[in-house]
Image (cartoon, helix red, strand yellow):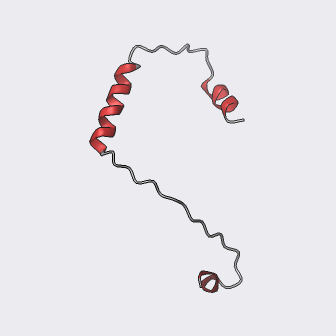
Amino acid sequence: MIKKLFGDKEIRIVVEDIQVSDVSRAELYQSTLELIDLFKDAKIDPNINISDIANEVNL
């Protein structure tokens, strides 16, 4: 039925399982604040190229 709507056009039909979260925005906000506090004293060497690290991870 869906293919008929698009005629001869190439289409992609995707079905995904959606995970419903029971976590509220307030809880997410609170956990974010806790993470910020946990890493507040972290120092990153200014000579480190973060892009290079990300590229290595994404290989």
Residue at figure coordinates x 34%, y 48% from the top left? 22
Q: Quadrant of the C terminus?
A: top right
Residue 7 lies left or right of residue 30; in this view the side is right
What is the count of numbered marks? 0
- Identified at 65% across, 26% down, the residue is 53
Q: Which of the 4 quarters of the picture holds residue 15? A: bottom right
- Quadrant of the rendered structure where residue 40 is? top left
Tell which of 33 and 16 is nearer to you: 16
Q: What residue is shown at x 65% (from left), y 69% (from top)?
A: 12
Relative to the observer, which residue lies in front, 31 or 54? 31
Q: Is residue 20 left or right of residue 29?
A: right
x then y, percent, for residue 33: 32, 29
Closer-to-camera residue (3/45): 3
Is the residue 27 above or below the residue 21 in the image? above
Q: Quadrant of the N terminus?
A: bottom right
Foreground residue among 48 and 2: 2
- Residue occupying the point 30% across, 44% down: 25
Outermost left residue: 26
| Residue 16, image x, y percentages | 54, 61
Q: Is residue 44 left or right of residue 31?
A: right
Does residue 22 lie above or below 43 as drawn? below
